Amino acid sequence: QYDDDDERENEEEHDDLDVHPTSDDIDCFALDESEEEATLKLKPIDEQLEIQHEIQDFKNAVPMLGDDYKLIDRLGTGTFSSVYKAIDLRYHEWDNSPWLGHHPPASSAHYQSVPKPPGSRVFVAIKRIYVTSGPERIKNELLLMELCRGCRHVSQLITAFRHEDQVAIVMPYHRNEDFREYFMELPMPGIKEYFRCLLRALRDIHARHIIHRDVKPANFLFDPRTGQGSLCDFGLAQRFDSKAPAHGACLHTTMSKDDAHGKYRTKSEYNSDWVRSQQVAARKKSKTRAE
C-alpha cells in the first residue's frame, strides 16, 4: 500500500541519491531486449512492408537519425505524428541523469530512474511530427515536456532535433499493451496500479500548472505485467494561470457542506468570484503601511 504524501517526502529526501539497477532489473533487461527487437516480425507481412517503407522515408528525411538510432518498428500513428521504436546506439556515451530523475525505491516511479546496465541495448520512442503541425504547437509541446522533467509516470523528454521541416522528439520507450486487450480481465490490483500511476502523473503535472487535455487510454501507456504506466502525448496540453480566469479554466467548485462533490459554476459566476477576490486583496493591501 502506498501513501502519496509519504512517498513525495521520501522522494524529496532521496533527491540527491544515485539509483543503481538491481540483479532483478538486469534480468528483466535481458529478457526485454530479445522480445522488443522482434516485435516487427510478429506483424502481418503487409504491415511489415508498410512500416519498413515509413522507416526508410523517415531516415531519408532526417539523415542524422542513423548516427544515433536504429529504427526497428512503428508504435503508433495519428493525425499529427507517428511514433517509432528505436535502439539508442549511443545511450551509454551520454549523461542520462537529467531525464532519468531521482525516484527512490519506495516510489512507484522508481523504474523511471533505474539506469540501464553497461553494454545493454536501450530502446527509445521517437516521435515524428508531421509538417501539418504548426510551429507554435510543436514549440508548446516541447516546452511543456521540458517543464515535466521529474514528474512521476510521465513520459520524459530525452532530446529533440529538427532537419529542415522535419521535427523528431526522443523519449524513453515504455512497453505497454492495447487497453482493449486487457481492460475486461484486469484484476483489482491491476486496476489500482493503473489509476495510481495515472492520478500521480496528473497530480504532478497539475502542480506545475499544466493541463494535458487529451487523457485517454491511447495516451496512457500501461503494462499490466509490471503495473507501470506513463502519460504521454502533450500535443494538446496547455499551461494555465491559477490566478486569473481564462478560456478553458476549471469552473467546478471544491467540496462544501451543501455540495459534497462540488458544483459547476457558470463563467460569469467564476469571473464575479475572481473580481471579488481581487477587490478583497486590494482592500487588504490598502490597509498596510507603505514602505
Image: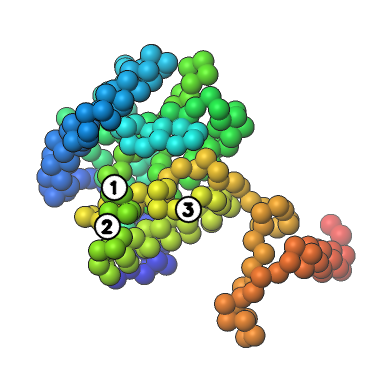
Q: Label 3 sits on what residue type?
A: Val
- The residue tagged 3 is 215
User: Do callouts 3 and 1 mark residues in contact (Cβ within 8 Å)?
Assistant: no
Distance (Cα) linking label 2 and label 3: 18 Å
User: Do callouts 1 and 2 mark residues in contact (Cβ within 8 Å)?
Assistant: no
User: Could you tell me which residue is drawn at 13 percent across and 42 percent down?
Assistant: 31
- Indicate which disc, 3 or 1, sits on the residue closer to the N terminus: 1
Does dot 1 land on a helix, a strand or a loop? loop
- Indicate which disc, 2 or 3, sits on the residue closer to the N terminus: 2
- The residue tagged 2 is 182
Q: Residue 116: give x, y in percent of width and height.
A: 23, 38
Which image quarter holds the C terminus? bottom right
Q: Residue 200: give x, y in percent of width and height.
A: 42, 59
Frontmost residue, 137 versus 104: 137
Q: Label 2 sits on what residue type?
A: Tyr
Q: How many marks?
A: 3
- The residue tagged 1 is 176
- Indicate which disc, 1 or 2, sits on the residue closer to the N terminus: 1
Frontmost residue, 253 versus 73: 73
User: Could you tell me which residue is drawn at 77 percent across and 68 percent down?
Assistant: 269
Does dot 2 land on a helix, a strand or a loop? helix
Frontmost residue, 127 versus 96: 127
Q: Label 1 sits on what residue type?
A: Asn
Disc number lying in front (2 or 3)? 2
For mark 1, does the 10 Å Cα neighbourhood hold few (<14), some (14 to 19), or many (20 or more) residues?
some
Q: Residue 256: in sight, yes or no?
A: yes
Distance (Cα) linking label 1 and label 2: 11 Å
Position of 255 relative to 244 (above/below): below
Does dot 3 land on a helix, a strand or a loop? loop
